[in-house]
Image (cartoon, rainbow, N blue to C red):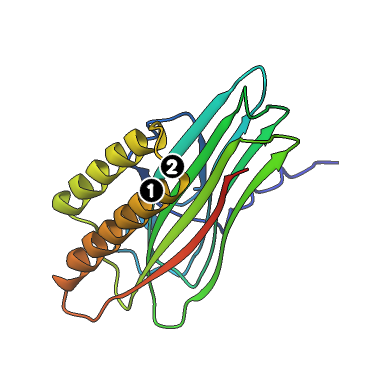
């Protein structure tokens, strides 16, 4: 009796993602499994794309200052559906007013995709928690930028340089000792710059862009 070898299954999840870099250690992943001919953003083959990014910090008596920031860009091209998740979590625990902790997590996620009837499931979350930590500084900010166009496009070198510059300043800001109020205002200004960069990049195309911004900011100090 002969046995036929099972044919390998094909993965329907495809995406094309590139990073502008993580200047602080972090987690930013995108599912990417695609036939070679479907890799380019200009492809019109129906596909599903997913991305999961985030920044997570936990400060305590052993590690009084914990900070992390990410700015990750995913260019999906033409898709029939996309699931994107961005999350920032900051925890401070076990410190005191005289020996306080600082925990800052900031995550920027940029997603571009094309299609006329695309189904999008976008989740953007932030959570800052003080656990028995009087006087601790705990800040979490999640910013999600979704660019949707009828036809695929690629961010040009000018847009990429602009986003890289924002990331450098975000990294410096994350490591600063600015107050919670000042930090939030400055991060909001950087987010406004990201939106402007994306809108300018798409305005050069011959279609009206849709740049959606989802913002969640949580925290302060006690």
Residue sitting at x 67%, y 20%: 61
Q: Secondary structure at mark 2?
A: loop
Of residue 61 and residue 56, the one placed in the foreground of this image is 61
Q: Quadrant of the N terminus?
A: top right
Q: Which residue is mark 1?
A: 182
How far apart are labels 1 and 2 at the CA level? Answer: 5 Å
Residue sitting at x 43%, y 53%: 109
Q: Is residue 210 left or right of residue 61?
A: left
Q: Which residue is mark 2?
A: 179
Q: Secondary structure at mark 1?
A: helix
Q: Is residue 188 left or right of residue 33?
A: left
Name of the residue lying farthest toward the front: 98
Q: Position of residue 46 (x, y in %)?
A: 46, 70
From this viewpoint, is residue 127 visible? yes
Q: Is residue 41 above or below residue 92?
A: below
Residue sitting at x 33%, y 34%: 172
- Mark 1 neighbour class, 10 Å CA radius: few under 14, some 14 to 19, many 20 or more: few
From this viewpoint, is residue 36 visible? no
The reply to whether the C-beta atoms of the residues labelled 1 and 2 are less than 8 Å apart is yes
- Mark 2 neighbour class, 10 Å CA radius: few under 14, some 14 to 19, many 20 or more: few
Q: Is residue 58 above or below residue 70?
A: above
Q: Position of residue 82 (x, y in %)?
A: 52, 66
């Amino acid at each position: 009796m002969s046995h036929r070898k099972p044919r390998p299954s094909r993965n329907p999840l495809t995406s094309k993602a590139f990073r502008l870099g993580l200047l602080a250690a972090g987690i930013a992943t995108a599912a990417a499994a695609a036939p070679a001919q479907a890799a380019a953003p200009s492809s019109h083959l129906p596909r599903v794309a997913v991305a999961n990014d985030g920044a997570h910090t936990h400060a305590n008596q052993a590690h009084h200052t914990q900070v992390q920031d990410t700015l990750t860009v995913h260019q999906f091209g033409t898709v029939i559906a996309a699931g994107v998740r961005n999350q920032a979590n900051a925890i401070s625990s076990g410190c005191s007013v005289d020996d306080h902790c600082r925990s800052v997590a900031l995550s920027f996620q940029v997603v571009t995709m094309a299609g006329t009837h695309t189904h999008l499931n976008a989740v953007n979350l932030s959570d800052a928690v003080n656990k028995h930590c009087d006087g601790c500084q705990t800040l979490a900010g999640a910013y999600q930028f979704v660019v949707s166009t009828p036809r695929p496009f690629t961010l040009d070198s000018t847009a990429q340089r602009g986003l890289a510059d924002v990331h450098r300043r975000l990294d410096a800001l994350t490591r600063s000792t600015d107050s919670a109020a000042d930090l939030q205002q400055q991060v909001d200004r950087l987010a406004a710059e990201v939106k402007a960069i994306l809108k300018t990049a798409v305005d050069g195309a011959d279609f009206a862009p849709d740049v959606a911004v989802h913002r969640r900011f949580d925290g302060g100090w006690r």
